[in-house]
Image (tube, rainbow, N blue to C red):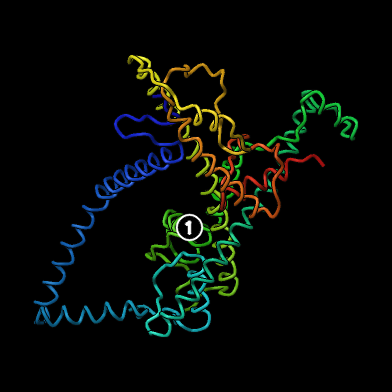
Amino acid sequence: MACRGVCCCGFGPVNEDNARFMMLMLLIILYLLCGAAVFSALEHPKEKQAKERWAQRFELFSQRHNLNKSELEKFLRHYEEANMAGIRVDSLRPRWDFTGAFYFVGTVVSTIGFGMTTPATVGGKIFLIFYGLIGCAATILFFNLFLERIITVLAVVLKSCHKVQRRRKGVLPHDSRQDSSNVILNRGDSLAGWKPSVYCVMLILCLAAIIISCCASAMYSSIEGWSYMDSLYFCFVAFSTIGFGDMVSSQRASYENQPLYRIGNFFFILMGVCCIYSLFNVISIVIKQVLNWLLKKLEITCRHSRSLRPRRNAVMPGHLRTRVRNISIDTDAVIESETDGRRMSGEMISIRDFLAADKVNLAIMQKQLSETANGHPRPCGSTNRQNGFSGGVGALGIMNNRLAETTVDR
């Protein structure tokens, strides 16, 4: 059998979307296993050393002060409970005054969740569930709108630079009036369908995230007293909304220029989260391209192995063949022509044709979601595969729609 975008070696027929999903799942599992191995090799020896040092200190302290070990352990458990409630040996700012509570709700709605402050009352926990449900949804919407605008700005700027380069090469005339545009349209050199490269957008967002992280790290290292490497580590953990909570900014009782520092802390965290969120969405497009490339390689391998095996001829159902060949939609669905040459009249129906109806149904649903999110139906002649930006819903759909809107010559 012929296979499209997937090698069906013992696993049965799978369409391209399911194949991409399964490959991504396997790659993520492999990525997790590799990460666990690396972190275990790096961190486990230090953890063992810390446990040994603590056991020695605990033994020496109990012997020096003639304390019962069980009573001392009980006291230390009480201190751990106090530590979870925000009580520290060093003087820190109150956790639940208005400024501390404002910092807490900021970490909640941004999904950072450092964990150094958590509600202890039943009413606080119940309120957090409803407050976080609405707040996180609104913040994700804000991040998507921010992504929309930053992609618009990048698309306009990059398109202007692209026009300047084409004029310097003599491809576009310096006079950009309507008659010139018509001439260019007739020649097929129009920029109406041009979109910036996904790699260029990723590079710009990466540089913006690095600049914000470096500036924020300089501020944290000078005010919090952290090393610059620790400050960079905190910036990534906070901006990516991982939020371990081992390092948290603005926790001391007082700082020099405290109001200015808190404003700067809020600004850097907000801009950093927005940039990293946008960067993650662009990187996900690149990952999807890599998956498509791997699927094509598997398809070539599968076709090659199939060509080495003798073909088994069978009569193909005519109604299935006619139905799948006449389907056409402006999405990811690609219909095979009759002159493709890859299927003879007597050969069994291929997996590609057999599953084309399911793929088209998925494509129709994706197109409807995209049109609903965009507010109006998209033109039938628009393309979704230019320069790496390919359709989708959610943040990816927002990026593709915004890029499509900014490619119209003004």
Quadrant placement of the N terminus: top left
Q: In the rendered view, does 31 fall on the left or right side of 77?
A: right
**Would you place residue 338 above or below residue 389 in this image?**
above
Q: Is residue 26 placed above or below 5 in the rendered structure?
A: below
Q: Is residue 409 left or right of residue 158?
A: right
Whole-percent x, y for residue 281 in the image: 53, 48
Residue that label 1 marks: 235
Q: Residue at x 49, y 77 (%)?
A: 254
The amino acid on which the numbered mark 1 sits, given as a three-letter code, is Cys
Q: Is residue 294 among what the camera can see?
A: no
| Mark 1 neighbour density, 10 Å: few (under 14) some (14–19) many (20 or more) | many
Q: Is residue 221 left or right of residue 202?
A: left
Is residue 303 visible in the rendered image? The answer is yes
Q: Is residue 330 above or below residue 111?
A: above
- Name the residue rendered at 53%, 79% in the picture: 99
Relative height, residue 391 to residue 183 (above, below): below
Relative to 321, 370 lies left or right: right
Q: Nearer the viewer, residue 360 or 241?
A: 360
* Residue at x 50% of width, y 76% of height: 131
Residue 146, given in percent of the width and then of the height, sits at 63, 57
Q: How many numbered marks, from 0 up? A: 1
Residue 338: % across, % down: 56, 21
> In front: 154, or 349?
349
Report x, y in % for residue 230: 41, 57
Residue toward you, 340 or 314: 314
> Can you tell which quarter of the image residue 62 is in?
bottom left
What SS does tag 1 mark?
A: helix
Name the residue rendered at 51%, 49% in the picture: 280
Q: Quadrant of the C terminus?
A: top right
